[in-house]
Image (cartoon, rainbow, N blue to C red):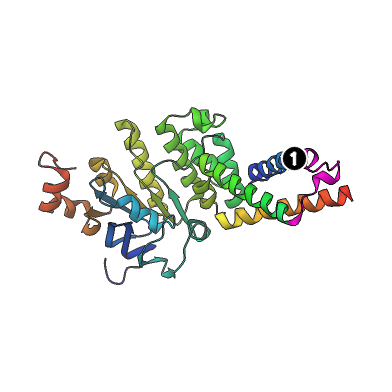
Amino acid sequence: MTPGTEYALRAEGIGKSFGRVEVLKSASMWGESGKVTTLLGRNGAGKTTLMKIAAGVLRADYGVISLFGDVKEHHSLARLARSGLMYVPQAQLVSPAYRVRDHLKALATTFGSAGIDEAISEMGIEALLDQTVRSLSGGERMRVSLALALARAPKVLIVDEPLVRLSPQNQEDLANSLRTLAERGTAVITSGHDARVLLSISDAIIWCVAGTTHHLGTPTDALAHSQFRREYLGSEFGEI
Amino acid sequence: MDAIVIRVLVLWLFLHAATSYGAQTMMESDLPQSLIANPVGTLFLIVVIVLAVRLEMGRRSEIVFLANLGHSSRKIALVVVAECLVLEAGLRAAVG
């Protein structure tokens, strides 16, 4: 963390256990407006749990969450959403029983309809509007979720593993959409295992390992980190 | 939220029909009096509706989406309870 930088979202010293299993111990995560921060780490390292806590979906055992410097003691996703945060979970954001259009209408009712047409066009979901989410593929559902995020233009977007199960082209397109959101001022916090794509769009890398976090800096700094390369990326990972 | 309001209405109608039938069969109570439950029964009915709506929202993956729109579980529960109370008041007024 750089002294003097005002972070959009800060989750610091977060601890969480599920029964006897300590999933997070003093883990930290922060997002800066206009930048993409990516959490990388092996399965079970605690990335999703940390993101859920930062988004108010789970409560931490200890630690502090602050949104634009305002410490949130009992924060829920609903309360954080009213302050400008949006969370796209790993499972899915959209509800299978409703049409894509219904989700956009619900978003427009709450936050206004400015940006919706542009988001539909940018994510290329015109043909999906009258389909129920149930009939969409995983990749299409994620495009719809990101269209909602683009339309919402949140101040902070936490999106968990958005590139999973997508084709390489779709991964690149969606990653570019996250980059676009950041360039419009959103603090984007994401995660995944698609290291090459994520490193290419990120401004900051956080490495989650064994329930704690290491802030590696820029993707260039991360690639220069020998332990990170050895233990996570693997010896065959080249440059980005 | 519109879908939740409709869901509550359907559940309320169904549960009232079921309890009314039960009252007519077991307690030989006639319509329309069989439609009115005692306070404890009404409270129980409202709790069942709140839980059923919550379960259905979880099943349909609606909770996170609605939370992203600023609607907390507490707010939704309050909407459900308020709707049930309005329907109960309306029913009692209609039955007289």
Find residue B67 and report its horizontal and vertical position in percent. 52, 52
Q: Amino acid at mark 1?
A: Gly
- Look at mark 1 in the image and give the residue it sits on: B22
Identify the subunit bearing mark 1.
B
Find residue B60 and report its horizontal and vertical position in percent. 53, 39
Of A127 and A83, nearer the camera is A83
- Above or below residue A10? Residue A191 is above
- Above or below residue A50? Residue A126 is above
Q: Is residue B11 visible?
A: yes
Find residue A50 and report its horizontal and vertical position in percent. 33, 56
Numbered range of the magenta stretch: B18-39
Q: Is residue B26 magenta?
A: yes
Kindly identify the residue that appears in the image at 21 percent across and 51 percent down: A219
Placement of the C terminus of chain A among the 4 image quadrants: top left
Binning the other alpha carbons within 10 Å of mark 1 as few (below 14), some (14 to 19) or many (20 upward) gives: some
Q: Is residue A35 visible?
A: no
- Report whether A227 appears left or right of B7: left
- Report whether A235 appears left or right of A219: left
- For this orientation, the residue located farthest to the right is B96
Kindly identify the residue that appears in the image at 46 percent across and 52 percent down: A86
